[in-house]
Image (spheres, grey):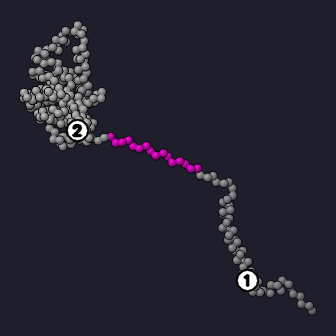
Amino acid sequence: MTNMTNPNETMQSKRTPEGDAFRAIARAATAAGLAAALVLAPLTLSGCGEEEEAPVAVAPPPPPPPPPPPAPTVTPIAQLMKELGISDKIRLPEDKAPGTDPERVAVLKFFDGFAKSKPEAIRAAMGPQDAAVLDAMKSGGEFAKACAPVTRIDLTTTNREGKAYVMAVYRAGSDIEAQLWAFKATGEGKKVETQLFESYVQPVDIMSKISGSNLIGEWVKVVDADRKVALEPDETVKPTARVQEQEKPEASGSGEESGPIGAPPMRNKPPPGGIDRPGRGPGK
């Protein structure tokens, strides 16, 4: 009887070492390929569909403009008065003081000469005409006599049409007198290199003719009005009472311009008795 054997069983039963090694290599290769496929799958999927747009470069905003240069700083008046040894008779509020240190120093030292009755402290700062008047008053002892009674000097400065002015209101007992000066001072820091003070025209009884917050401007207006009247022909000056009123002080030996008792020198000496005290005093 013939023994029939299944060929597959025969083939499966004949396993050799070489065959086992081959099958192991095949299985390893299959596993490695599967792992690679799993790794590459997301990359393949992400590449499908629409392409992403490249990002648009945005220009950075322009840099902000540089800040403006700082305003020039000035030394407070109180500090300057202490450093310079200015008399405590002087009053110069910050909001009425000049805008530069050389101007502040020049104004304080100039009027300190009046407060301390020291003509040599102010002469170098004066113009020739005012210096000549000062010399005459000094030699006659009038300067010291006029300044001695002064107990307080209120100062205010302003700029008008490109020129600096300083107004001084002097208190001497019950009298209140005033002066107006045009001035210029230059320098570096607190050092004054050049300065010039020139007395301004002073109408008689000026303090009773000006009021408000801009006394210097009002003063200039009064002078301009008086000059306009003086330039008119004699026959057009009316009324006569106005002319007589203006001529009254001349009988005492004084012209239209006069310097206050407590604030010499001006180009003309003050009338006897000084300027009448106004109904109100300057702001304290």
Q: Quadrant of the C terminus?
A: top left
Give the camera-side residue of 149 and 125.
125
Depth check, mark 2 against mark 1: the one in front is: 2
Residue 143 x, y percent position in the rendering: 10, 29
Residue 122 x, y percent position in the rendering: 16, 33
**Left or right position of 238 against 14:** left
Query: Which residue is painted at 86% across and 85% down in the image?
Result: 6
Residue 58 x, y percent position in the rendering: 55, 48
Whether 177 is drawn above or below 55: the answer is: above
Whether 87 is drawn above or below 251: the answer is: below
> Could you tell me if the residues under marks 2 and 1 are in contact, i.e. CB atoms within 8 Å?
no
Highlighted range, magenta: 56-71
Query: Which residue is painted at 15% across and 41% down in the image?
Result: 85
Query: Which residue is painted at 21% across and 42% down in the image?
Result: 79
**How many other residues sit within 10 Å of disc 1, few (<14), some (14-19) or many (≥20)?**
few
Label 1 residue SS: helix
Give the camera-side residue of 112 and 275.
112
Q: Amino acid at mark 2?
A: Val
Separation of residues labelled 2 and 1 (CA atoms): 109 Å
Is residue 192 among the parts visible in the rendering?
Answer: yes
Whether 59 is among the magenta residues is yes
When asked about the image quadrant of residue 233, the answer is top left
Query: Which residue is painted at 16% across and 24% down in the image?
Result: 267
Is residue 179 among the parts visible in the rendering?
Answer: no
Label 2 residue SS: strand
Whether 50 is drawn above or below 201: the answer is: below
**How many other residues sit within 10 Å of disc 2, few (<14), some (14-19) or many (≥20)?**
some
Disc 1 designates what residue? 21
Disc 2 designates what residue? 192
Q: Amino acid at mark 1?
A: Ala
Residue 64 x, y percent position in the rendering: 44, 44
